Image: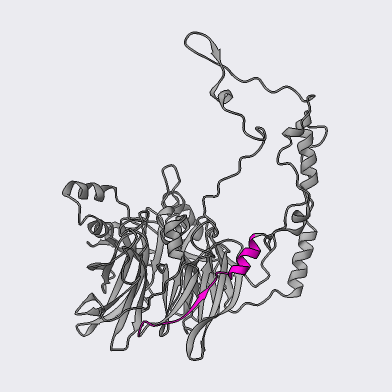
Amino acid sequence: MPYQYIKKCGNLLAAARGSNIDIFNSADGSLCSTWSSAPAPAQVSQNASSIPEDTDANLAAQEPQPASVENEVNTTSPPAKRRKLSSTEDGKNIESKEDIKEPEKGGKNEKKQKQNKRPGSSSSGLEAPAVIALAVTKNAQHVVAITGEDKSIRVFEVIEKHGIPQLNHISQRAMPKRPSSLAITDDSWTIISADKFGDVYSLPLLPSEVTPQAQATRASSMASERPYKPAANELTIHSQRNRKALENQRRHGNAAPEKIAPTFECNLLLGHVSMLTDLLVVTLNDRNYIITADRDEHIRVSRGIPQAHIIENFCLGHKEFISRICIPNERPEVLISGGGDDYLSVWNWEAGKLLSQAPIKSYATDVLSERMNEADRTALKESQKVAVSGIFHTRQSSNGGFLDLILVACEAIPALFIFSLTANNVLEYTQTLKLQGNALSVATDLPTLEVGKRMLVSIDDIYEPGSATQLRPVGDNITNPLQAFVFENGVWVTDEGFKMALVKDDEALAGRDGNNSRLQNLLYSIENLRKRDGEERGGEAAGDDITQDAGQETGAVQDEDVQVTG
């Protein structure tokens, strides 16, 4: 099973593999322990035949009611409306195509059941909610993970049991909406979480229950809500069918389950009008900021807690969605962003100023077109679109100085693209690091037994290199889903003497043999952010209005201030 996320945790490596988190010794590559969110087999079979815990008890105890009232309509109801007939060339009238169709089961008033395109955990190869994000506190004492299907934020404490590092599951908190990204403040006490509905919340690292006084206030407010009352009455309806519908509304109007607020401390900080894709917490000049990126090409700079509702400025200039943002540790005034555009952008985010841009599409298409002829290569470069799935930073020593290296991964591309961030904030391309599979995640600055630091790249061993849909042939497995590299003489080279321990499970086999849609969505979901034809783009229309509301003149970018390299 490939690792969708890997994170450095002190001298350890936390690696998310489906619904599991493995802990490795990053120095020698040995496996220390594994935490799994999958329930025991007995618990799975028991839960399969029981009512979910969050199901309203009143609804469960109700007698079943017919889904449609059309079967109960008597013959005294008004006749059906006449349907329009269409005439043929010979003048004869025929029934419309709508009449030729076979009637749907249960009558025309019966609502069609919407097809749930998002595969569930039970219909795929993965047995439990998968980990979709990882974060580690600055003191490397806690690991925070998001599990997608149950919308939960889980906190783990890194402990040692019999001298073996393990993850101790401290808490699981279900959020109101599904989280998409998270960050942890520098003091390692607060979690900042962004969700797919554009909201950003703050939670304490260690959960605290809501006080009884707050619970009583919430209960009283729910009790004071006016009951549901249909707008129609006996004087405004004129058919037996509508009368039956009114009776059903009155019978079930107050039976809807109530929305229960979280029972843990959870504060709303700010909100976007678009899906949030990435989140950073940064400190500059002794001031804290929250930087958020969304699907509508916006990068927003907000003040930190407790003034997160105040917008400092925007970084506007992308034409497609923004999927990843990165701030180098030693240069916190610089921000690098990327997404569905053909380029990477470098910003002075405090001023909302675009400093430079660097191409990324050309390097990605070069990797995909190595074995193509000239005609196919030209067609690929015109039609291929890139989606940045990861931007990472590391500082390496070279020729008596230091290089700030920016590592860029693109979705379904079997390579890692290396750029050097110069002193004048320009990204200079230095190297394309070929991989055995598509790049998924990167962990840098890992300690080694020798002198220096090591970089690990998680690669996909399920799908073909360069593809997000075609599975590898059975038996065509790579040596290890984690490849190691070291920085020597100004370039990255493979660390041949280092191997990570292999962890085998049945989830990957289930993803190959059965419904692998959930596995595919887990590994490759960035391209789905791209807007289709007909969807409005928020960066062009909404950018000026939002900038005016913030009171900042950051929407315009002067041409002479932009340095293009490539």
Residue 371 shows in the view? yes
In the image, 465 versus 434, the foreground residue is 465
Q: Where does the N terminus fall, quadrant-wise? A: bottom left
At horizontal 53% and vertical 10% (from top left) the residue drawn is: 92
User: Which quarter of the image is occupied by the C terminus?
Assistant: bottom left
Q: Nearer the viewer, residue 391 or 102?
A: 102
Query: Was residue 134 drawn as part of the magenta stretch in this picture?
Result: no
Can residue 522 be seen in this snapshot? no
Indicate left or right for 228 with 92 as reference: right
Residue at the image point whose x is 65% and y is 19% from the top: 82
Q: Position of residue 524 (x, y in %)?
A: 41, 59
Residue found at the far left of this picture: 374
- Give the residues in magenta: 28-48
Question: Is residue 90 shown above or below 524?
Answer: above
Q: Quadrant of residue 504?
A: bottom left
Q: Position of residue 546 (x, y in %)?
A: 48, 56
Q: How is the image coloured?
A: one colour
Residue found at x 29% / y 85%: 452
Farthest residue in the bottom direction? 163
Is residue 45 covered in magenta? yes
Q: How many marks?
A: 0
Residue at coordinates 58% horizontally, 23% vertically from top-left? 99
Query: Which of these two is toward me, 10 or 119?
Result: 119
Q: Position of residue 209 (x, y in %)?
A: 68, 75
* Image location of residue 320, percent across then percent down: 38, 53
